[in-house]
Amino acid sequence: MIRLKRVYEKFDITDGTRILVERLWPRGVRKNTPNIDIHMKDVAPSNELRKWYAHDPAKWESFKVKYRKELDENPGPVSKLIEIVATNDTVTFVYAAKDTEHNGALFLAGYISEKLKHMKK
């Protein structure tokens, strides 16, 4: 199961393995925080895509297409993330964006879930 949570929300034991899926380390969060188990910046949107998107909901549909292309062209880190999700009961993708309905972690969770479904067939 993949859950989503802002990095600024309180850590909970039921979060399971917490994976930061942001290219940049979030502001105001200590690098040695025990609330993040893994930082997988290589599955986050590229700096170019991140800057272009700038959390503009009007660009959400285009962002998803461009982000999918980046993920499809980056099989190593994506495979590692799929392996982590497949071997843990609960994984929480941790992200920094304020918008909970239009962010990279949300799209990434759907993308990884889709890949896992295809693997099980």
Image (cartoon, rainbow, N blue to C red):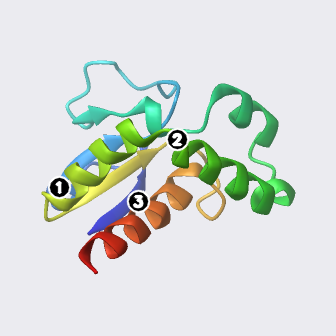
Locate residue 34, reporting x and y percent. Answer: 20, 31
Determine which of the numbered discs, if any, sits on residue 28 in the image: none
Determine which of the numbered discs, if any, sits on residue 16 in the image: 1
Q: Do the residues labelled 2 and 1 touch (CB within 8 Å)?
A: no
Name the residue rendered at 66%, 26% in the picture.
47
Name the residue rendered at 37%, 34% in the picture.
40
Q: Are marks 3 and 1 in contact (CB under 8 Å)?
A: no
From the image, tell me which residue sits under label 3: 4
Locate residue 9, reporting x and y percent. Answer: 39, 49
From the image, tell me which residue sits under label 2: 96
Specify the quadrant of the image occupied by residue 59.
bottom right
Q: How far apart are the two marked residues, 2 and 1, measured between alpha carbons?
A: 18 Å
What's the amino acid at mark 3? Leu
What's the amino acid at mark 2? Ala
Name the residue rendered at 41%, 55% in the picture.
5
Q: Say few, some or many: other residues with alpha carbon within 10 Å of mark 3 (under 14 / 14 to 19 / 20 or more).
A: some
